[in-house]
Amino acid sequence: MSGHSKWATIKRKKGALDAKRGKVFTKIIKEVTVAARIGGSDPDANPRLRLAVQNAKGANMPKDNIERAIKKGSGADGADYIETTYEGNYGSVGIYVECTTDNLNRTVANIRAAFNRHGGNLGTNGSLSFMFSRKGVFEIVQPAGLDLDDFTLELIDAGAEDVEAEEGYITVTSAMEDFGTLQKKLEEMKITVENAELRRIPGVLTKLDDETFKKAMKFIEVLEDDDDVQQVYHNIETTEEQLDLID
């Protein structure tokens, strides 16, 4: 299993657990709200909102919830969110945190406290710029009867850098600038995308022993549990056996 595919597997496993706690909907609603606030309430004219709505549907969010989030973002009293990032380390692991908040003081205090409490070090913005590249990532449930070779060639022509199939899922990766083109191509092909996003992909991976891995994943979970945190990225090289340690 390669890096992109393994990352997607971890994300799906954690996503299934998060869904039980209602955290997935909270983060998606915030993204829909922010997208509507920035670019307007029409998904056809607002690519970011269109993507957020697509991901909401992929997570089986009720239509009423999506519409309320759009109204909240586009209304005169729409939520005034700020997007910010934090970078740090947990031992040899790079940790990149993306947040959306209405209170920067609260957010930075919570993030700093989490790093301090779990033995991490919060660094300056830009300190991990060498470690992560922004890529477009599409996660697709593999349709029955799909010719994977033909599908791969079509997507490569549309700008895909990598197409990986694993356990009934297809993970498609593109350069950030080709994200929109590839999204349109998948729409034209009538391929249902379960999740699509601009993700920070690590270029250099770090191996951890099982005990350190469990502690690192616990720290990452604490960060993800914060209501202001949208995404947490890391550069841990995970083994098949370690995937089973995630709970």
Image (cartoon, rainbow, N blue to C red):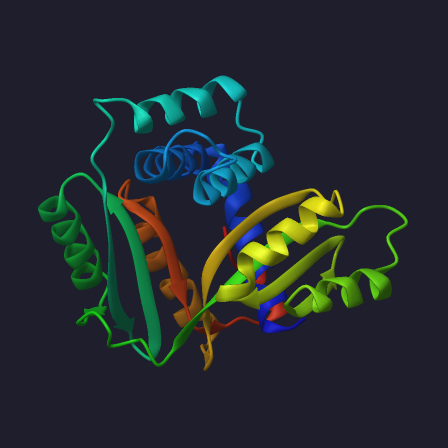
Q: Quadrant of residue 120?
A: bottom left
Q: Residue at x 45, y 21 (%)?
A: 67
Q: Which quarter of the rendering shows the N terminus? A: bottom right
Give the percent coordinates (x, y) of residue 223: 30, 52
Apparent side of residue 26 relative to residue 140 in the rendered image (left or right): left
What's the residue at 56%, 38% (across, down)?
54
- Residue 239 quadrant: bottom right
Q: Is residue 112 above or below residue 81?
A: below
Q: Farthest residue in the front direction?
A: 45
- What residue lies at 86% left-to-right and 52% top-to-bottom? 146
Q: Is residue 26 left or right of residue 123?
A: right
Q: x, y percentage for residue 4?
A: 58, 67
Q: Quadrant of residue 173?
A: bottom right
> Do we see residue 216 in this rendering?
yes
Q: Is residue 62 above or below residue 24?
A: above
Question: Is 169 drawn above or below residue 103 in the view shown?
Answer: below
Nearest the viewer among 102 and 74 is 74
State the residue lying farthest toward the left.
Answer: 105
Residue 71 % position (x, y): 36, 21
In the depicted structure, whether residue 194 falls above or below residue 9:
above
**What percent of the width, then of the height, locates residue 156?**
71, 68
Viewer-side residue, 151 vs 93: 151
